[in-house]
Structures are given as C-alpha cells and as structure tokens.
Amino acid sequence: MPVPLQNEKLKNFVLNDIRVFFKESLVDKTDINNNDIPDYIENIAIQADATIKALNYLGFINPLESKRYKNVAKFIDIHIVSMKYNGVAYEEPYFFDKDYALLIKINNNLNNFPGNYWTVVSHEIFHLYQYGYSYFKASWYLEGMANWAERLLRNDDIEVKATLNLPNSKKSLHESVYNLPYNLFWYRLAKLSPNDNNKTLPSTLMKMTYVNGDLVFKDNQIIGYHFIISFLENLQKSSNLYFIYNSFPTEYQQKDVKTYPIIIGAVKKTMLELEFKKTEEVKKFLRLKL
C-alpha cells in the first residue's frame, strides 16, 4: 500500500469543471502519453467528464446547474485518497483551493482501473446529480439508481438484472428493495418504462477514449433514462414539500424510513404519468399500499 510522503505537495489535474487532487506517491505513476499526469488520474477525470457529458445530453440537470448548488459550487472536485471504500460522494459543498466545490473521494488503488469493469467514478458522479434534485438519501434509492447509471458506460446484462418483478406486497417491498441498497428495482423500472424513443449517444461521446485508447462507452444501449429523469423531477417536488420548513435536514431526517413511502409515491406517480403498460405486475405494484 503506497504511503504519502511527509509534507508532500498536493497536485491537481483540471478537465472542464472537474478538478482532480492527488499526491504522486499515492498513485501508480504510469504515464503512457508522457504528459506528466499519471494515467490513473487522467482516466478518473476522463470517466467523470464522459459521465457528466452523457447525463447532460440525456437531459439530467447538472448538479452545478441545479437549484440546490447553482451559484454555490463552481467545480466538482475528486480527491484521490487511501481508504477502504472504492468511492464516496458528499452532498455539502466545501471550500478548497479558493472556490466552493462538490466533493468526491476515490480510492487511490483500484486494481487495473478503468479496465472493462470499473465505473465507480460514474457511480459517485451520479450521486451528485441525485443530491442536486432532492434531499432524500435512502440507500436503496441512492445506491440502486446509481448502479443503474453506471450502465451508461459499461456492458451489463440488463436483460438478466431486469427480470425480478416489481414488489407486489409489503413483504417483497422490504425484502427486495428497502433492505437491499444495491437492488434491482430500478433496472426493472427502466426495462418496463416507455418513451425512450431509441435514443443513442452522439458519436462525439461514443468516440471518447481513455489514455490507452480504450473506449469509455462500451456500447450505446440506453434504457430507462426518460423514466429516471421524470422520477427525479417528481422526487424534487416531494422533497421540497417534505422539507419546506427545514432547509438543513439532518442525515437522519434524510434517511428516515418515513421518507420511503414518499419516494415510492414518486415512482408510482411517474409510472402513471408516463403511461406504463398496465400488466398484472404493474397493476399490483401500483395498488400496493405503503
């Protein structure tokens, strides 16, 4: 495990609105394009930039342009640190290097990043989008949906992940959704949702590459983005109403089980607005009392 040198200067790499901060002693120094930026750092910035461009293209509100963060945070900062987690995203803006920014921390030692698997940067970037829409922080909503968002960049067997039916009872709702942060609920909703109109990413994005020339986007399959955007817009309204007299909710209040029915209510509202096909599965879920 690399150990930072005492009093080592913090370096940074800037790509559009992304600032990546790191200590050279903490990361692999491979630099195949000889630009004096470790490939590990440059690839993290590339994945973040590609994710933001794709989400913005699809119609998601960039967190830096959201009502919550606009004119507050100027950058998205990614700090490369030694930690036990792969990554973490924080909702509160912080002041660093002369500006306010939104903060993500990424593990300094992700094996063979990015390879064909690692999309942790995309995952954490999407959390910032979620924070921009609402204050709700139930893990089954945050993590499950961010897992869906990673699908923008990597090959994933959505046909398998989307096979688990929507819950049709309180018991199945708890077992397959509430109690599982990385659940398949959002994959199923994405698969069942209409109105995506076979939209694909533009060639400018599809041609983006990492430092070694590997494509950032592994395919052009986009499923459920219209539903996810519409849901987040409805959730924003619910969040604004729920916290109308509480501009600074605590972590406990944001994760309170009392918010769970509100989040599911936003799901149902979105399904009705988008006119999901009324199969028995969908009808049973919509009738489910919370």
Image (cartoon, rainbow, N blue to C red):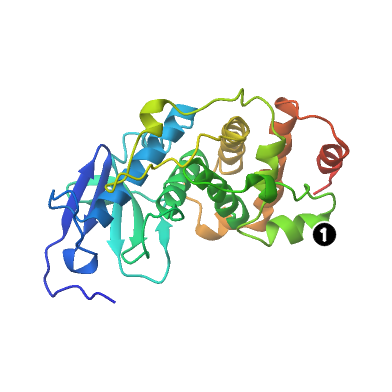
Is 91 on the left or on the right of 76, as rendered?
Answer: right
Q: For the N terminus, which image quadrant?
A: bottom left
| Residue depicted at x 41% and y 33% | 206
Residue 177 pos. (x, y %): 70, 55
Q: Is residue 288 visible?
A: yes
Is 204 on the left or on the right of 4, as rendered?
Answer: right
Residue 83 pos. (x, y %): 36, 70
Q: Quadrant of residue 4?
A: bottom left
Residue 77 pos. (x, y %): 29, 49
Q: Amino acid at mark 1?
A: Lys
Residue 108 pos. (x, y %): 31, 65
Is 271 on the left or on the right of 44, as rendered?
Answer: right
Q: Secondary structure at mark 1?
A: helix
Tell which of 83 and 248 is nearer to you: 83
**Residue at which label 1 appears:** 171
Q: Is residue 66 visible?
A: no
Is 260 on the left or on the right of 165, as rendered?
Answer: left
Query: Is 216 placed above or below 272 here?
Result: below
Tell which of 198 and 67 is nearer to you: 198
Q: Dot 1, how many residues are within 10 Å of its Cα: few (below 14), some (14-19), or many (20+)?
A: few
Q: Quadrant of residue 264?
A: top right
| Residue depicted at x 61% and y 22% | 197
Tell which of 203 and 261 is nearer to you: 203
Tell which of 137 and 5 is nearer to you: 5
